[in-house]
Image: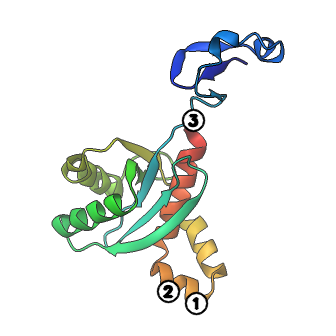
């Protein structure tokens, strides 16, 4: 494994060079980072529904995932306004959009609605959008929801944000 020098992506050092301290020409480099390919930046996951939109975000390194309060779906204009607010409040750089595929992998009516939302709504926000297969995320979220206390359930309002957290977790594991 080679190590990429931070702020010098075109320069690498082998483990032998580090062990043998053959890095004298690199001593002025800020630091050595072995995981230069880690996707950095806060990501917002969205679980689109006709009644509620579930949201979840992660930290800059994609380690901690937390559900956010869901947003009632009251139309595109209101939804985009509330999403923009969530993006700003959480310093979001990427969007992971859940795509509700059928169990056989085909697209149904729900997938077409999500694609329309991406094309006519999310694209206007100007952030990179990754589409994530969300099959069974709602099932996982319902199981977690039933294990929560009433106080925790009130905090998130609906199971949709937990589904968004599972979507984000899947996205981070796959990317």
Q: Is the residue marked by circle 3 packed among few (<14), some (14-19), or many (20+) residues within 10 Å?
A: few
Q: Give the mark nearest the N terminus, 2 or 3.
A: 3
34 vs 23, nearest the viewer: 23
Q: Which mark is residue 38?
A: 3
Q: Which mark is residue 150?
A: 1
Q: Is residue 9 visible?
A: yes
Residue at point 56%, 29% (across, down):
37
CA separation in Å, label 2 and label 3: 34 Å
For residue 121, side relative to residue 47 (left or right): left
For residue 48, side relative to residue 133 (left or right): left
Q: Where's residue 94, x and y in %?
A: 39, 46
Q: Which mark is residue 66?
A: none
CA separation in Å, label 1 and label 2: 6 Å
Looking at the image, residue 87 lies above or below residue 143 = above
Quadrant location of the C terminus?
Answer: top right
Looking at the image, residue 102 lies above or below residue 1 = below
């Amino acid at each position: 494994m080679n190590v990429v020098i931070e702020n010098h992506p075109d320069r690498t050092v082998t483990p032998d060079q580090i062990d043998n301290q053959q890095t004298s020409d690199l001593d002025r480099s800020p630091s050595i980072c072995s995981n230069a390919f880690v996707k950095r930046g806060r990501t917002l996951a969205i679980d689109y529904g006709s009644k509620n939109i579930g949201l979840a975000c992660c930290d800059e390194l994609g380690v901690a995932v937390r559900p956010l309060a869901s947003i009632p779906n009251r139309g595109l204009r209101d939804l985009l306004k509330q999403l923009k607010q969530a993006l700003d409040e959480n310093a979001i750089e990427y969007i992971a959009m859940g795509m509700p595929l059928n169990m056989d992998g085909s697209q149904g009516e729900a997938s077409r609605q999500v694609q329309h939302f991406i094309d006519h709504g999310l694209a206007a926000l100007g952030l990179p959008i990754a589409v994530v297969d969300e099959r069974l995320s709602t099932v996982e979220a319902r199981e977690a929801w039933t294990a929560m206390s009433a106080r925790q359930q009130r905090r998130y309002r609906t199971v949709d944000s937990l589904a968004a957290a599972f979507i984000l977790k899947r996205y981070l594991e796959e990317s």
